[in-house]
Amino acid sequence: MAHRLSSPNRRGCAALVCIAFGLATIPTLLSGCGGSNGAAEKNTGAVAVVRAESDPLPNIIFIMIDTLRADRLHSYGYSRQLTATMDKIAAEGVAFDRCIAVAPWTLPSIASIITGYNPCVHKAASFRQISAMDAGRTAVVPVLDDSFVTLAEELQQLGYQTAGFCANKFIKPEYGMAQGFDVFDTGFAANTVQGKHINEAALKWITESRDASRPMFLYLHYMDVHGPYDAAPRFLDPLLAEVEANPNKQPMPEELFQRINLYLRKPPANASDPQRWNRLSRFRDYWVARYDAGVWEMDYYLSQLVGKLEELGVWDDALVVLTSDHGEALGEHGLWDHGYSQFQTDIHVPLVLRWKNHLPAGQRVKATASQLGLGPTLLELLGVQPSMEVQGLSLLGHIRGDGDIETTAVVSADKISGKQFAVVRDNYKLMLIPRPPQKQPDGSLSPPQVSSWLFDLDADPIEAFDLASTYPEKVRELADVVKAHIYECRVVKPELKPQTRTIGEQEIQKLEALGYTGQADGGDKPPEQSP
């Protein structure tokens, strides 16, 4: 079982919360400290079999589908049937119905998955440094410190041959993200790279360079779903035709259209009917269809990968992980893209674990689960202890239906200020968003505020009804979790300083193409948000 860092002394929590939000005082919603874990639903008959020490280590295939919302899988309830391959993997393994990403954008999310630490500890999390590029300041990017033992390093120490193939410009050696990999290929990294290129590179390595006498850890990071939503016409055209034929499609206000980031707000690169942009781009259904086409395309390339891995004899007995780093807003709550909020559109991601004869096929885990525990989960399944203490907790208790498990997930590291927080515990979710002081008519500044929204995700999955005033005790309970989180951020690895590196114009342009600089996304100005 993974080590859990010992609980810090909670004295001084309130002051630390004030520091974290950049406020002199915090409203009474943040009174008190502590908080208890929620209970998990029992999963009767569930079995998770940890590898015996005498058994061979399995191949591990880690499939990271960038920007994939959980609610886009048919097996997670979506009406469109675009994900036959993903659904089949889910049917063969354990699917976590409420898996919560650690952060709503790539760099801090992946850094947390591979280290087991929260963004405030590993510090590869600052979007402000990236957005500052367009303001003429030093072009620097955050880097994951090499003092962390990553999942790949843990597996390497066990004898795994480790290989990564990644199309995301952030998940590169230059950002400290390749620690522990024997091979880490990012030569094709771009947000418009189709999954077939990842497949080709991975399969070439398996057939030509892999040492078959050693277990394999294969990390595959796909970008088909990520903006600018340029799926191939074979996937895009049927969905856009469906939108065009729908007499009930609703036009969206021009203000909502103008909020779409510039790198997204353009016709698809491979449009078979360029005039569709003029006819449909003011309908939200059009943008949903373009996003969905990427999901469909991704599933197709995943089916191609699985077929080849089956032919090579490395799929059937492999321990498979299928997940995403974050979701995507598609106009809900007046938002687009990702990273600007902690609504479920941005942080609710699929998570499937599949390992024949070790994990129960077709099981659904209802309890809230944090991606922070993904690394510890894999190590526990292998029957080994992590080499260093981490903040993430193994999720095997969720599968077994253990009564005393962590059902709380904390989300942080938004792109705007890094000071938004969300807490999901069981069916309740609290969002805390700092509001800066406002200039008053007399020239003075208003006191800073913290907006708090509470949602019941079971009754209100689209987060339309704020219950904060109805259940103030629940707000206080979940706010306590934020305070404890912030305090732990201060006492875990306090000696670690943020690591950065300076980058050149060419790399800035590549990040801009991903929507990761101020020019492309509107800089640090927070979009308006509302339930």
Image (tube, rainbow, N blue to C red):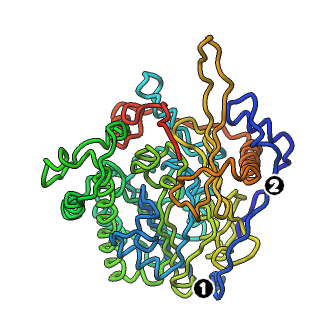
Indicate which disc, 1 or 2, sits on the residue closer to the N terminus.
2
Mark 2 Cα shell of 10 Å, populated few (<14), some (14-19), many (≥20): few
Say left or right for 408 vs 131. Answer: right
Say left or right for 488 vs 171. Answer: right
Disc 2 secondary structure class: loop
Q: Which mark is residue 7?
A: 2
Q: Nearer the viewer, residue 504 or 265?
A: 265
Question: As shown in the figure, which amino acid type bears the numbered disc 2?
Answer: Ser
Q: Which mark is residue 55?
A: 1
Image position, residue 167 (x, y; %): 36, 54
Residue found at x 64% / y 52%: 467
Q: Is residue 407 above or below residue 503?
A: below
Q: Quadrant of residue 199?
A: bottom left
Q: Quadrant of residue 511?
A: top left
Disc 1 secondary structure class: loop
Image position, residue 24 (x, y; %): 74, 28
Q: Nearer the viewer, residue 119 or 201?
A: 119
Q: CA distance from mark 1 to mark 2?
A: 35 Å
Mark 1 Cα shell of 10 Å, populated few (<14), some (14-19), many (≥20): few
Q: Quadrant of residue 290?
A: bottom left
Residue found at x 59% / y 65%: 458
Task: Please tell me how many numbered marks the rendered image carries.
Answer: 2
Say left or right for 275 vs 264. Answer: left
Image position, residue 97 (x, y; %): 54, 69
Residue 121 visible (yes or no): yes
Question: As shown in the figure, which amino acid type bears the numbered disc 1?
Answer: Asp
Image position, residue 529 (x, y; %): 51, 41
Q: Quadrant of the N terminus?
A: bottom right
In the image, farthest residue toward the top: 442
Say left or right for 328 vs 104. Answer: left
Q: Is residue 180 above or below residue 499?
A: below
